[in-house]
Image (cartoon, rainbow, N blue to C red):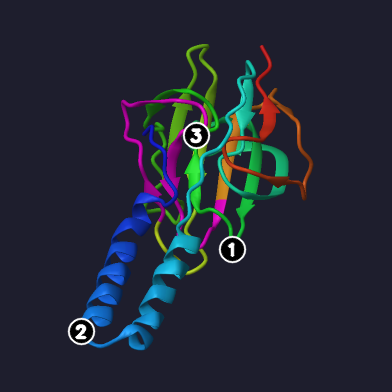
Amino acid sequence: MNRNTLISRQGLLPLLAATLVAVLVLHFIGLRESLAFWALGLVVLVLFRDPERDIPSIPLSVLSPADGRVAVIEKTDDPYLSRPSLKVTIDMNAYGVYTTRSPIGGKVLEPPNNLAGKHHPHGVWLQTDEGDDIVLVMNRGRLNSKPHCYIRFGDRVGQGKRCGFVHLGGRVDLYLPENSQPLVAVGAAVQAGSDVIARLVH
């Protein structure tokens, strides 16, 4: 999805509803009574804000998929592709931007191990044109809200492009090729689509 925006698609309907009610109350009742609904619209703008990001053009780079802090960097098994991997986990900011972005550019595939329904979130398999495989996993948000995924199997997605939304933030896991080189440390603050967190090694 390529667009200029200030608010995510998930916030459009709440913003429209709050604005419509505010206008109606202002017109039929008065300014003072409408202030609460104008304030509600402002809260929606803050919670669902979705600013543009400067996406770096660095070969073999892996971008942060979410705003937050790096919580885990470890070698582990990738349960979605059944391979050794480097796992990077990012805890999203509770009051940050909730839009997630694609860490790489490439094809969107369905993992052979579909773990949905087994107490695991559904992962999205991203494959670069060079054949590097990355699995992006958006976990439920702080209120157990289900993430929204904007991309579908068979699509092509550009690096740093919007690919999902997690209400009030949650946790995002990346399973990278095992020999990938991490470029951040645990505790580092990162921004989706603009900060490089790892490098793919060929």
Toward which corner of the image does residue 95 lie, by quadrant? bottom right
The residue singled out by tag 1 in the image is 94
- Determine the CA span between mark 1 and mark 2: 37 Å
Which amino acid type corresponds to the residue marked 1 in the rendered image? Ala
Which residue shows up at 63% across the image and 48% down it? 90
Q: Is the magenta region chiefly helix, strand or loop?
A: loop
- Determine the CA span between mark 2 and mark 3: 46 Å
Whether 104 is drawn above or below 45: the answer is above
The residue singled out by tag 3 in the image is 102
Toward which corner of the image does residue 77 lie, by quadrant? top right
The residue singled out by tag 2 in the image is 28
- Determine the CA span between mark 3 and mark 1: 20 Å
Q: Quick one: SS at disc 1?
A: loop
Q: Is residue 63 magenta?
A: no
Question: Which residues lie in the magenta part?
Answer: 147-171
Which amino acid type corresponds to the residue marked 3 in the rendered image? Ser
User: Percent x, y for residue 160?
Assistant: 52, 32
Which residue shows up at 40% across the image and 51% down it? 8
Q: Quick one: SS at disc 2?
A: helix
